[in-house]
Amino acid sequence: MEEIIIEYHTGFPQQVGWYDVLVDGLEDRLLHRYCQMYGRHEWKDINGCKVDREVLWTGTAEPCP
């Protein structure tokens, strides 16, 4: 059986959208967005709550509905 290795990245991706992430070692799905008013990137959960902990992300963005 072949082991699948997933490469996670620090920082923020270039595209906005939903990403598979690790937060505190737990898998989750978060929205990456860029706030033009304040000029900064941010992660939000499905409820719209901002995530201020370190986020490791992988994959490509899935569009926001």
Image (cartoon, helix red, strand yellow):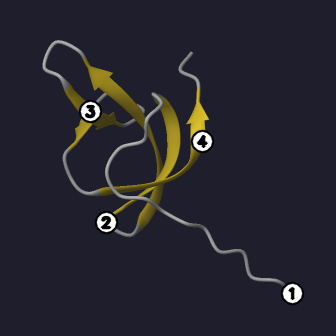
Q: Whole-Å distance between the Cαs marked 4 and 2?
A: 21 Å
Q: Which numbered disc, 2 or 3, marks the residue that appears first in the sequence?
A: 2
Secondary structure of residue under mark 1 = loop
Residue on which disc 1 sits: 1
Toward the viewer: 35 or 25? 35
Q: Which numbered disc, 3 or 1, marks the residue that appears first in the sequence?
A: 1
Residue on which disc 3 sits: 41
Depth-wise, is mark 2 or mark 3 nearer the camera?
3
10 Å crowding of disc 1: few (<14), some (14-19), many (20+): few
Residue 54 is situated, as x and y percent measured from the top left of the image, at 25, 57
Quadrant the C terminus occupies: top right
Residue on which disc 2 sits: 24
Which residue shows up at 51% across the image and 35% down it? 18
Q: Is residue 47 visible?
A: no
* Above or below, comparing residue 45 to residue 23 in the picture: above
Q: Are marks 2 and 3 in contact (CB under 8 Å)?
A: no
Instruction: Name the residue type under label 4.
Output: Thr
Looking at the rendered structure, which numbered label has been put on residue 17? none
Q: Whole-Å distance between the Cαs marked 2 and 3?
A: 19 Å
Q: Which numbered disc, 3 or 4, marks the residue that appears first in the sequence?
A: 3
Which residue shows up at 59% across the image and 41% down it? 60
Q: Whole-Å distance between the Cαs marked 3 and 1?
A: 39 Å
Return the residue found at the far left: 38
Residue on which disc 4 sits: 60
Instruction: Name the residue type under label 1.
Output: Met
Judged left or right of residue 28, residue 43 is: left
Residue 36 is situated, as x and y percent measured from the top left of the image, at 23, 15
